[in-house]
Image (cartoon, helix red, strand yellow):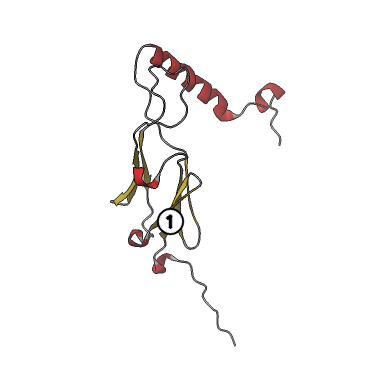
């Protein structure tokens, strides 16, 4: 069975409307002097057979301005830097990340966070957590006659 969607609706991305509404409210709040919503960098998280990974988009950020902490199976990615660019009293539009952020990620229980590693390359911070040996999948051989 197929569902009919009028052409007007089918070409609109589902999240486009939400982004427009958010932008309208942000602009209205800014007009009344309310501070902007805290900036949070875009991120991805995934797992494969060997581990769990978190990737955070941080173009323009230096590794020395970023801190990583794991506490109670939660990864905290924090950043703080001094704004060395042009001092602007009032922005007409500001979409480039701010001077500080915090992102929290719930980590799965099957990882070994003591063996975690992190790399920062081309504006992408990638944190890798290997799976504990007992959590890795294994092939079991079947013996037959």
Q: Please name whichever residue, 72 or 64, is drawn nearer the observer in this view of the structure.
A: 64
Which residue is the extreme one toward the bottom? 145
Could you tell me which residue is drawn at 34 percent across and 58 percent down? 113
Task: Answer above or below: position of 9 versus 108.
Answer: above
How many discs mark residues in the rendered view?
Answer: 1
Q: Is residue 120 visible?
A: yes
Q: Please name whichever residue, 50 or 40, is drawn nearer the observer in this view of the structure.
A: 40
Position of the N terminus, as image quadrant, is: top right
Q: Is residue 66 visible?
A: no
Tell me if mark 1 has few (under 14), some (14-19) or many (20+) residues whose alpha carbon lies within 10 angstroms of its own.
many
Splitting the image into 4 quarters, where does residue 65 fall? top left
Task: Answer above or below: position of 95 versus 58.
Answer: above
- Helix, strand or loop at label 1? It is strand
Could you tell me which residue is drawn at 36 percent across and 32 percent down? 99
Position of the C terminus, as image quadrant, is: bottom right
Splitting the image into 4 quarters, where does residue 98 fall? top left
In the picture of the structure, the residue carrying the numbered disc 1 is 128
Which residue is the extreme one toward the top? 32
Q: Position of residue 89 (x, y in %)?
A: 38, 17
Position of 100 with respect to 93 (left or right) is: left
Could you tell me which residue is drawn at 56 percent across and 26 percent down? 16
Q: Position of residue 32 (x, y in %)?
A: 36, 11
Splitting the image into 4 quarters, where does residue 34 fall? top left
Task: Answer above or below: position of 91 versus 114.
Answer: above
Q: Please name whichever residue, 120 or 140, is drawn nearer the observer in this view of the structure.
A: 120
Q: Position of residue 105 (x, y in %)?
A: 38, 45
Q: Position of residue 4 (x, y in %)?
A: 70, 28
Q: Please name whichever residue, 93 or 138, is drawn nearer the observer in this view of the structure.
A: 93
């Amino acid at each position: 069975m197929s569902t009919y969607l009028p052409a007007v609706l089918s070409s609109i991305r589902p999240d486009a409307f939400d982004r427009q509404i958010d932008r309208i409210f942000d602009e209205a709040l800014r007009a009344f002097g309310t501070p902007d919503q805290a900036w949070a960098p875009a991120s991805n998280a995934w797992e494969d057979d060997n581990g769990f990974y978190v990737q955070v988009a941080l173009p323009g950020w230096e590794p020395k301005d970023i801190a990583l902490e794991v506490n109670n199976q939660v990864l905290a990615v924090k950043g703080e830097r001094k704004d060395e660019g042009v001092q602007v009293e009032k922005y007409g539009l500001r979409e480039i990340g701010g001077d500080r952020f915090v992102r929290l990620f719930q980590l799965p229980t099957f990882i070994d966070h003591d063996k975690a590693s992190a790399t920062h390359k081309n504006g992408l911070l990638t944190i890798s957590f290997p799976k504990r040996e007992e959590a890795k999948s294994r092939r079991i051989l079947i013996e037959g006659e």
